[in-house]
Amino acid sequence: MKVKILTILSLAAVLFLGGCRGDSNTNTNLATNMNAATPMMADTAAQATVKDALEKAGFNDVTVTATTTEVTLRGSVPNGKLGEAVRIATEKANRKVNNQLTEK
């Protein structure tokens, strides 16, 4: 009986200590992890590029806002032209387009 208890306790101790060791892939530097995310800052250059391209194509009722991660389109476009406006914005912005446009 004593042998069984000692065996179980020894096994439990080994498993416990084995689980406590550090993993070489674990990054414990929290400041580095926090800075790794891309901040969502305004991107006025992309905003102007997309707005100019849309106006050149005749989409004058569209408001464009751009960040470093996406471009948002708001406003209205003529019926059947929604896809064209999104395509132009996608090509010019070279990032995700958040389409909030409506058709007239």
Image (cartoon, rainbow, N blue to C red):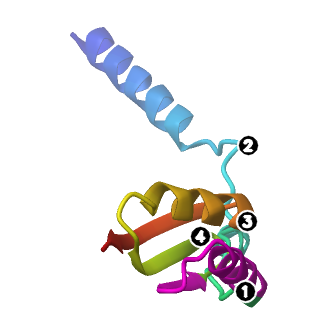
Residues in magenta, as a range: 45-65
Closer to the chain start, of discs 1 and 2, is: 2
User: Relative to the observer, which residue lies in front, 65 or 4?
Assistant: 65
Asked which quadrant contains residue 35, the reply is: bottom right
Total marks shown come to: 4
Label 1, label 3: how far apart the Cα atoms are: 10 Å
Tell me if label 2 and label 3 are in contact, CB under 8 Å.
no
Q: Residue at x 46, y 28 (%)?
A: 15
Q: Amino acid at mark 2?
A: Ser
The tag on residue 48 is: 1
| Residue 53 among magenta residues | yes
Closer to the chain start, of discs 4 and 1, is: 1
Q: Residue at x 38, y 72 (%)?
A: 100
Closer to the chain start, of discs 2 and 3, is: 2
Label 1, label 2: how far apart the Cα atoms are: 46 Å
Disc 3: which residue: 92
Q: Is residue 95 above or below residue 11?
A: below
Closer to the chain start, of discs 3 and 4, is: 4
Label 2, label 4: how far apart the Cα atoms are: 35 Å
The tag on residue 70 is: 4
Label 2, label 3: how far apart the Cα atoms are: 42 Å
